[in-house]
Amino acid sequence: MEKCSLLLTAPPLVVLLVTALNPGDADPQRLPSNLTTSPTLKTAEAAAGAHPTAGGRAEGKKEEHLDCPPLGLESLRVDDSQIRASSSQRSGLGPQRGRLNIQSGIQDGDLYDGAWCAQFKDRQQWLEVDAVHPTLFTGVILQGRNSIWSWDWVETYKVQLSNDSVGWQTCMNGTTEMIFKGNRDPETPVLGLLPTPTVARFIRINPQSWFSNGSICLRAEVLGCRLQDPADRFEHDPLSKDDLDFRHHSYMEMRKLMKSVRDECANITRIYTIGRSYMGLKLYVMEFSDNPGKHELGEPEFRYVAGMHGNEALGRELLLNLMQFLCKEYLKGNQRVVRLVTETRIHLLPSMNPDGYEAAYEKGSELAGWADGRYNFEGIDLNHNFPDLNNIMWDAQEKAADASKVPNHYIPIPEYYTREDATVAPETRAVISWMQDIPFVLSANLHGGELVITYPFDCTRDWAPQENTPTADDTFFRWLASVYASTHLVLSNPDRRVCHYEDFQTHKNIINGGAWHTVPGSMNDFSYLHTNCLEVTVELSCDKFPHASELPAEWENNKESLLVYLEQVHRGIKGVVRDKVSKQGIADAIIKVDGHAHDIRSAADGDFWRLLNPGEYKVVVWAKGYFPSMRRCRVGMEPRPTICDFTLTEIPAQRLKEIQAKGGRVPQDHQLRVRALRLRKLRASTKAINRRREKQQLQTRRAS
């Protein structure tokens, strides 16, 4: 029999262990004879080929095992002081770097390298984790070193356990010491399950063999269930008091949850789709409004987008949590939520890349790795797939005699981007079309793998690797980013640990996207230059795909930030541009704010929203065929918009003739016409591609 033998002497833990294994059943007459007895587990060899679920567990055909969560090396719940090693090559490769999925900087040799690496190449090296409390250890996940310069990984290892970090026992395979299979490359996480879950406080990973041309280097996570000590009378508060569905949802489960929210709050919700993924999964959006399905005059439109990278799963779950929260709190009469729903039209897209998410979900939270599911089915990174309008604008400014005359908003999609053979993902096409249909004012794009808020521009001039590249609305973007960062429970903690290799606290946890790293074709930049909508990127957590047990805490970390950021859509000025005679709203009127080289346009009904910091502004509005109008509008400190309406007088036909006779030019909105034409071409090519893809998929199904 394979077993990992280690006995604890404290009798009270026996009852607690049975409670952990069989919740609700602590009958002393049914105690196992050995404290380490547990449900049947696969051997380490079998586990290497198992398929873990979203919770990080491995599934067998007939066998089950205890689903214990990670201790938190990756999520940083495990402090640096809890990790020790036999030796280290240098401080940048110390035990504190032996965390699953930790990323290194570009330069080797600094304090933030991509693994723990032993100083010596022998079988006496080890990485030790102190769980602090008695813990039922069930497994280890191993990964090689993250580096663009070196290839290092551990191929086999032993696991040792201890109660005092002095006396150690090795997991056994019968009468011999158990050898666990490790890695064959630097990045793929490999799960090794203990043949028998074992209670201890300390665990060691003891490498036995490693890549022949490399060093002993590894990143790790440890799976284990903490046992409660009966002598500890302190009752821990639940991680969240909100009654929400805290788990990772597959595509079908997500759809079911969204429908349940719609049914519970039918008067204020609507589910609609904006398109399909490459594999045909619908891109679902949940809308919250007191008048679902309709744009109301003067009411701003807001959106949250998550899951652009499919393996960055936290944003997806946070938006599903937010749906449930808004519904429940509205029904309870929470005045803050009621005000948001009645004064804002809220759109939540939880999964922009469902194909990528399903690939990551199939592997599980711990085994999905750093890149599995990041791209869509075609291998396209959606975060680089929008048209690069930045350099189109900058090039035009450099060539123009007067750069101030170059259009700074509503820049049309390039002609090449509209063709059927353009490398444009169906998910990207769907979002662009969505942006055209709804006059969004404010948005946030939820990502994961870091803790920082970034704001446009994301793309740098001439694609420089790193360069601060501010927009005309830099001060307001910084405000938006600061609002989220300052209310996030982890971001606002000055004692928090660096996720990987960059200390964003030196930037107050916000940074210009280009100053971090250039991202040509980002959704943020496209939203700013092609529509009226301001958008930031929220990097939610160090762990891209946190374990389900961590979701309640992550909800609490982000709940206030999600709400307070949403409320910023009501800052600045808003109004309606109307015809003086007919009183009808004027669509596509241009709103210029003096001192801000970025204009916006009125929506179909003539209403507009211009997000601005407190101050007094000179605002000029003009539309084709109308005389321009100017007003001074003051924005106060209060989080509510200043009403700033405009009435335009139509230019008489005779006056137009006089202007033209004198050689004058009547303003023409050539840019708007080109923009509309390019969008029609993009939608036409999208329909053609979709028809062709559906035909191919139908033929494939028939052939199978």
Image: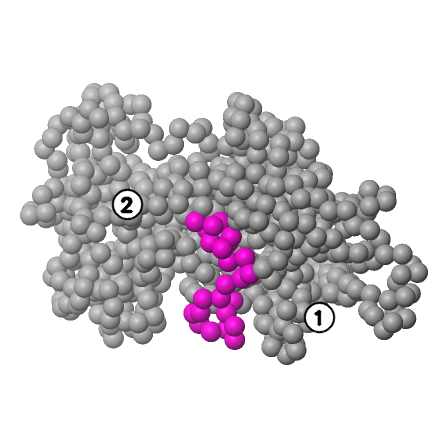
Using the rendered view, name the quadrant where residue 654 is placed: bottom right
Whole-angstrom CA distance, mark 1 to mark 2, is 49 Å
Q: Amino acid at mark 2?
A: Arg
Mark 1: secondary structure: helix
Which residue is identified by label 2? 77
Residue 179 lies in what quarter of the image?
Answer: bottom left
**Horizontal and vertical percent for residue 181?**
27, 58
Q: Secondary structure at mark 2?
A: loop
Q: Is residue 473 within the magenta segment?
A: yes
In this orientation, which residue lies closer to the viewer: 5 or 460? 460
Reply yes or no: does residue 12 show up in magenta: no
- For label 2, the crowd category at 10 Å Cα-Cα, with few meaning under 14, some 14 to 19 and many 20 or more, is few
Of pointers 1 and 2, the one earlier in the residue sequence: 2
Tag on residue 554? none
Where does residue 518 sit, x and y in percent of width and height? Answer: 47, 67
Between 597 and 278, the residue placed more toward the observer is 597
Q: Find the magenta span and give its range.
A: 459-482
- Residue 358 horizontal/vertical position (percent): 51, 50
Q: Which mark is residue 415?
A: 1
Query: Which residue is painted at 60% across and 62% down in the image?
Result: 597
Residue 35 found in image quarter:
top left
Indicate whether 500 appears above or below 485: below
Foreground residue, 656 or 130? Answer: 656
- Give the quadrant of the N terminus: top left
